[in-house]
Image (tube, grey):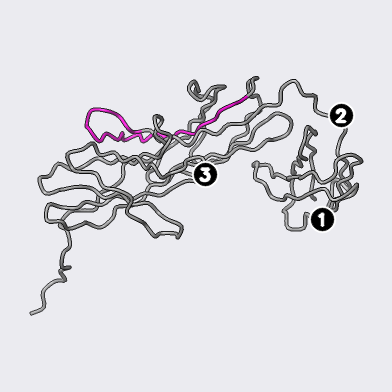
Amino acid sequence: LTSSVYTVNASFMQPQQVCIVGMDSLSNFNRVVWEKPISDGIDYFNVYKEGSAANVYDLIGSVPYDDTAVFVDVNSNTAVQAYRYKVSIVDTCGTESALGAFHKTIHLTINQGVGQTWNLIWNHYEGFGFPSYNIYRGTDPSNISLLTTIASNLNSYTDLNPPGGTSIYYQIEVVNTNGCDPLKATDYGVSRSNIATVEVVNNIELTTEQISIYPNPTTDQITIQSESVLNNTFKIYDQQGREVINGKLTGKNTEVSLGKLSRGTYTIQVDGNYKPAVIIKE
């Protein structure tokens, strides 16, 4: 007779699933939260993070079963990138379960739109389904409030009417509608992105000099013409606020190819206090 397959040193425990991940507001590091099962057979939990290679996870810490089922990743930098995390169970025999499914944090970036508008772009939260993103805004990182709520199939937003002040702060939030409570007493069911900030130009007149762009509309190449702006960098953004081309003005006339871009409307911004210009590619 042939017996069923049995893996030596395999834990009888089911993989531990992450409940939610996101930035911890107290430390600004990422926080991993799970709901531990009620069991006498669990010794501790291992927490893993995806490294520099996709789908390769490294052990970054452990949490004893009797502790709160929360791990703060002090080696995360929420301002730089998003991260993926997984959790496993180690039973009282020292045997580790398989890893659960990953959850991925939200990383928010900002760039300037036309005039003093701001484009927000973030990666989708991954790990559970949810209906909406909440967008927060404020002039102080400790006092931000809900600006608007948008559908969860979107990951960009343009703030057309930002408040006055020297700085503006934004943050993206996801709510786990099923809740997430490692203590069965305190709600941890919210994931927030990094707080991204922009400096607002105050008391500085934007120059009345317009950067000349021709031909505009264009089917391929444009020439950027300016008498006084030399060696300044320029960036071209699409309608979603994504940077698609960048470079330097090399002289009074700088030629730029738009051949790889699809038809549509783009915005060009030159370093300094110069008004952005709109480019139309046909």
**Position of residue 65 measured from the top left corner of the image (x, y, whole percent):** 18, 43
Q: Mark 2 or 3, which is nearer the eye?
A: 3
Q: In this view, does 123 lie to the left or right of 29?
A: right
Report the residue marked by disc 1.
220
The image's mark for residue 80 is 3
Question: Which of pointers 1 and 2 lies earlier in the amino acid sequence?
Answer: 2
State yes or no: residue 128 in magenta. no
Quadrant including the N terminus: bottom left
**Residue beneath disc 2:** 208
> Which residue is drawn at the image coordinates 65% and 41% (left, top)?
241
Residue 115 drawn at (x, y percent): 74, 30
Q: Do the residues bearing badges 1 and 2 touch, measured as CB atoms within 8 Å? A: no
Residue 263 lies, in percent from the top left, at 74, 51
Secondary structure beneath dot 2 equals loop
Name the amino acid, label 1: Asp
Q: Nearer the viewer, mark 1 or mark 2?
A: 2
Tag count: 3
Residue neighbourhood size for the residue with mark 1, other residues' Cα within 10 Å, grouped as few (<14), some (14–19), many (≥20): some
Residue drawn at the location 23% of the way across and 36% of the way down: 68
Which of the pair 69/128 is nearer the observer? 69
**CA neighbours of label 3 inside 10 A, class few (<14), some (14 to 19), many (20+):** few
Residue 55, quarter of the rendered image: bottom left
**Sequence-wise, which precedes: disc 2 or disc 3?**
3
Asked if the residue at tag 3 contacts the one at tag 2, i.e. Cβ–Cβ closer than 8 Å, the answer is no
The Cα–Cα distance between marks 1 and 2, rounded to whole angstroms, is 27 Å
The residue range painted magenta reads 167-189
Q: Which of 83 and 104 is in front in this view?
A: 83
